[in-house]
Amino acid sequence: MAESTPAPRMPSTHGTVPSSLFNTCFALCVMIAAFFPAAYFSGNWIWDHAGRGIPTDFVNVWAAGRLVLEGHPALAYDWDIQKHLELALLKQDFSGYFAWHYPPPFLFIAMLLAHLPYSAAFVGWVSLSLIPYLAVMRAIVGRPFGLLLALAFPVVLNNVLVGQNGFLTAALIGGTLYLLPTRPVLSGICLGLLTYKPQYGLLFPIVLIAAAQWTVFCSAAVTAVAVAFASWIAFGTESWQAFFHWMPMFSHAFLAEGKAPWWKMQSLFALVRFFGGSEQLAWIFHWVLSAVVAVTLITIWRSPVRYALKAAALALGTLLTTPYLFMYDMMVLAIPVAWLVRLGLAHGFRAYELPMLAVAGTFVLVFIVSGIPLGFAASLIVGALVLCRAGPWWRQAPGLRLAAAAT
């Protein structure tokens, strides 16, 4: 069989970070680092000039924690009670709700943060959740440049601005995938802790079963049961009852009624609704995409393709298969990017890879500045790069693939 022509690569020494990549990341880091002090002292972050709290996502974490400290964890799920507490804190009204909809185990973190004044809790949460994210990105890339790449990822701007948990989600998904080949028990613990956002763990059982990763599977299951049991002991049966009572209403409000504007969500489901499609049509598109992603992942994970590509594909799949996806959750997109950068540094970047990563990053920045929902397009670009990296395996004859899989 004739060999396929390899894709052209950038003329650089393997292992050396291309100057264009380093300079871009450095410039983004400086921009992000300068933005938040300027925003804080100009009254555009956490507090405004009048001393009122700026309505943003973190307020529901702090308010939920206060209700736990007051002995009423189940009331954290009541939208009206939550909003009353948030209004008292912020000292100004806002439209809609910042509702608490996480499973009870996440109340442990909310409770700890609520011991602090609001500003300290906000900054402390962002800073502490940043640490495991940085550690995971450094480990995946395999060199100190991973820290710069992590801080330069454009979604950092959005996640810190609203005080969200994107750093933690990315760290748990990245940690699960990085530790899986060598530390399966620790990998499973990371995956079990991800149950605080269960919509991002739905593909993992399918892939773990397909790849016969039983240690990871069992470790994740034990961890998930353990943290659920601990939350039941700490917060009572009422907290779990409240979670299951309010969850359908939350899903209906955001996925059927569009309480959050469709442009804020970056999934295919939301994109169909944004362009005027019906809810039924959006679900059809979503489930078709989810089925394609699941089949593709099973195929990749049962193949001899490089593990870095398997990990990148699974991390990306978690984003493509959830209809409820805000920009701050796209911190997870940093994980497949890190795996691609690892491969590029080890084997050379293909000529189109860095420009296309730049386009994906630009799409994220455009959303932050203008609100144009380009997050799904950014995910597709990264997904295309992963599949192109896997291209030589896809093009192999079936007999060669079977032979490679047997070795």
Image (cartoon, rainbow, N blue to C red):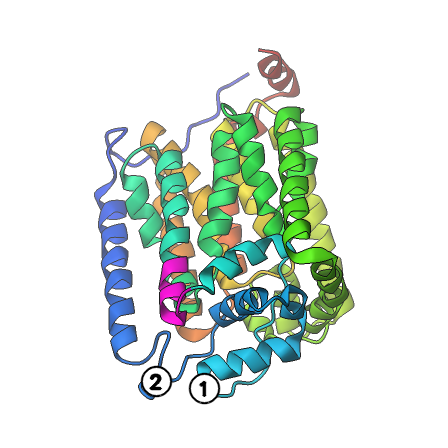
Question: 241 above or below 392?
Answer: below
> What percent of the width, then of the height, locates residue 29?
26, 56
Check if mark 1's residue and mark 2's residue have beta carbons within 8 Å: yes
Q: Residue placed at 66% from the left, 63% from the top?
A: 269
Q: Is residue 124 magenta?
A: yes
- Residue 28 shown in magenta: no
Cα–Cα gap, marks 1 and 2: 9 Å
Q: Which residue is mark 2?
A: 51
Q: Is residue 40 above or below residue 231?
A: below
Question: Crowding near pointer 2: few (<14 within 10 Å), some, many (20+)?
Answer: few
**What amino acid does circle 1 point to?**
Lys
Q: Amino acid at mark 2?
A: Gly
Q: Secondary structure at mark 2?
A: loop
The magenta-colored residue range is: 116-125
Disc on res. 91: 1
Residue 346 spot, x, y in % from top left: 34, 28
Q: Is residue 32 left or right of residue 321?
A: left
Residue 106 rendering spot, x and y as whole percentages: 57, 55
Q: Nearer the viewer, residue 217 or 290?
A: 217
The answer to which of marks 1 and 2 sits earlier in the sequence is 2
On-image quarter of the N terminus: top right
Q: Is residue 321 visible?
A: no
Residue at x 35%, y 46% (from the top left corner) = 354
Q: Is residue 140 above or below residue 367?
A: above
